[in-house]
Amino acid sequence: MTRAWIVPVSLVLCGSVVAAGPLSGGRPGVAAALLLVFVLLAVVNSPLAFPRSISAPEAQRRSAVDGRPVVFWRPGCTYCIRLRVRLGRSARRLHWVDIWRDPDGAAVVRAANGGDETVPTVVVAGRPHVNPDPGWVREQLSRSR
């Protein structure tokens, strides 16, 4: 779990160091703006930007019942962030599995990707799709209704 917070915490610390320069130079507005940018980047790269993760077996069980896709992801992955942002509010309807928190989820991703933990891997109707277009995922989600 702590591995998921390394990037966000590092961004906040770096932002603090970068903002210290303008602050010591008597420009608190610039320092605040810089710190705000780094904090926003930290939030986007944190697990907070994603819907609550569940275990892989639970996600697969729920997907079998409601037909919604399962998204295997990890914090700090730019492609996962891109998918999450482009899906908007509809992302909450998907089943999200953080492979850093769930060994079963990591195993599913490795099995689908020849041993690699390539994310996002989206499983639709039992078939894995690696880094799919967000529009395609949205279309699959609308079909599951």
Image (cartoon, helix red, strand yellow):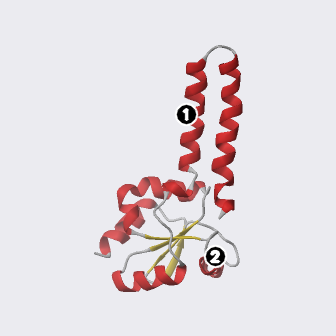
- Mark on residue 36? 1
Q: Position of residue 47 (x, y in %)?
A: 55, 58
Residue in the image at 31% along x and 74% along y: 143
Judged left or right of residue 20, residue 133 is left
Q: Mark 2 — residue?
A: 106
Q: Position of residue 43 (x, y in %)?
A: 54, 47
Q: Nearer the viewer, residue 51 or 68?
A: 51
Mark nearer the N terminus (2 vs 1):
1
Judged left or right of residue 20, residue 55 is left
Quick one: label 1, few (<14), some, or many (20+) residues within 10 Å?
A: some
Residue in the image at 69% along x and 15% along y: 25
Judged left or right of residue 98, residue 63 is left
Q: Position of residue 81 (x, y in %)?
A: 53, 55
Residue in the image at 67% along x and 33% along y: 16
Instruction: Kindly report the distance in space between the C-alpha atoms of the residues bearing marks 2 and 1.
Output: 33 Å
Q: Amino acid at mark 1?
A: Leu
Please tell me how many numbered marks the rendered image carries. 2
To which quarter of the image does residue 37 belong?
Answer: top right
Q: Secondary structure at mark 2?
A: helix
Residue in the image at 69% along x and 30% along y: 18
To which quarter of the image does residue 77 belong?
Answer: bottom right
Judged left or right of residue 24, residue 59 is left
Quick one: label 2, few (<14), some, or many (20+) residues within 10 Å?
A: many
Q: Amino acid at mark 2?
A: Ala
Q: Position of residue 125 (x, y in %)?
A: 43, 82
Q: Secondary structure at mark 1?
A: helix
Quadrant occupied by the C terminus: bottom left
Q: Nearer the viewer, residue 24 or 112?
A: 24
Q: Up-down: is 89 above or below 96?
A: above
